[in-house]
Image (cartoon, rainbow, N blue to C red):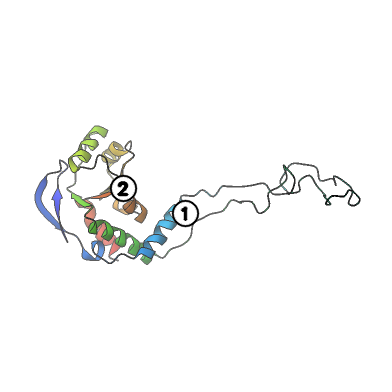
């Protein structure tokens, strides 16, 4: 598919680029997308939750009343889970929520995400640009020129650009990543995908393996 190239002022440069059909025009695999997004979100969880069990609660271990003759249930310790202040039964323990996915499936998920965005006409190709110094106002002007000031956007750079990244860091609705940092979640979480020319070849090379 052909897409016109815009400059950072939002104007047509008169050039067009050919996006690879094997990356931007496949039949999306929804299950692959689901698994990749699930893995991404699982990896964000710290898994440091912990509840004290019976053996970890502070308290005496003496038998609090005689075994028989009280008319109530037997009880051996104030740390009994049935008592207030007692231990928790089967409470959460620290654990890792991460799980493994094959590289081929993750590539399929990213290609599916790209294809979904392309089908919705939410992919913009922008010529490479840079700022002399980090300046949030300049980045906001780029967003306004592209009509993205009120939308969630993902800018994909070919290589790391400190000035562009720092200019966007204070804006909650915009995210700047390099092609190697792309994730299926980030692609789908943005309303619009802004691909800089320098990133196209790297994206297609990484996903065509």
Q: Quadrant of residue 208?
A: bottom left
Residue 112 placement, left or right of 143:
right
- Local packing at callout 1 (Cα closer than 10 Å; few below 14, some 14-19, many 20+) is some
- In the picture, the quarter occupied by the C terminus is bottom left
Q: Nearer the viewer, mark 1 or mark 2?
A: 1
Q: Which mark is residue 154?
A: none
Residue 19 placement, left or right of 43:
left
Residue 135 visible? The answer is: no
Q: Please, is residue 86 above or below residue 110 in the view? A: above
Residue drawn at (34%, 50%), measured in percent from left and top? 189
- In the picture, the quarter occupied by the N terminus is bottom left
How many numbered discs? 2
Residue drawn at (49%, 57%), measured in percent from left and top? 98
Find residue 135 and report its horizontal and vertical position in percent.
Answer: 25, 33
Sequence-first disc among 1 and 2: 1
- Local packing at callout 2 (Cα closer than 10 Å; few below 14, some 14-19, many 20+) is some
Residue drawn at (34%, 62%), measured in percent from left and top? 109
Depth check, front residue: 121 or 73: 73
Find residue 38 and report its horizontal and vertical position in percent.
Answer: 43, 57
Residue 20 placement, left or right of 76:
left
Q: Which residue is mark 2?
A: 177
Q: Which secondary structure, mark 1? A: helix
Q: Which secondary structure, mark 2? A: strand
Disc 1 and disc 2 in contact, CB within 8 angstroms: no
Residue 199 placement, left or right of 110:
left
Find residue 132 and report its horizontal and vertical position in percent.
Answer: 21, 35
Q: Which residue is mark 1?
A: 42
Find residue 123 and report its horizontal and vertical position in percent.
Answer: 22, 53
Residue at the far front: name it. 71
Residue 104 visible? The answer is: yes
Mark 1 and mark 2: Cα distance apart in space? 20 Å
């Amino acid at each position: 598919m052909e897409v016109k190239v815009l400059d950072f002022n939002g104007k047509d440069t008169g050039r067009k680029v050919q996006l690879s059909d094997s990356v931007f025009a496949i039949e999306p695999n929804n299950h692959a997308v689901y698994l990749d997004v699930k893995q991404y979100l699982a990896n964000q969880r710290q898994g440091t939750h912990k509840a004290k069990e019976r053996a970890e609660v502070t308290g005496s271990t003496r038998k609090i009343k005689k075994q028989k003759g009280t008319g109530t249930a037997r009880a051996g310790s104030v740390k009994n889970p049935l008592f207030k202040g007692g231990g928790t039964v089967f409470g959460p323990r620290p654990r890792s929520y991460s799980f493994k996915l094959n590289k081929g499936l993750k590539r399929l998920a990213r290609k599916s995400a790209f294809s979904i965005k392309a089908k919705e006409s939410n992919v913009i190709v922008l010529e490479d640009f840079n700022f002399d110094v980090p300046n949030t106002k300049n980045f906001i002007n780029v967003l306004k020129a592209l009509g993205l000031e009120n939308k969630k956007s993902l800018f994909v750079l070919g290589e790391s650009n400190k000035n562009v990244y720092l200019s966007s860091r204070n804006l909650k609705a915009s995210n700047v990543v390099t092609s190697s940092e792309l994730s299926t979640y980030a692609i789908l979480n943005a309303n619009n995908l802004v691909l800089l020319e320098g990133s196209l070849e790297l994206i297609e090379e990484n996903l065509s393996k």
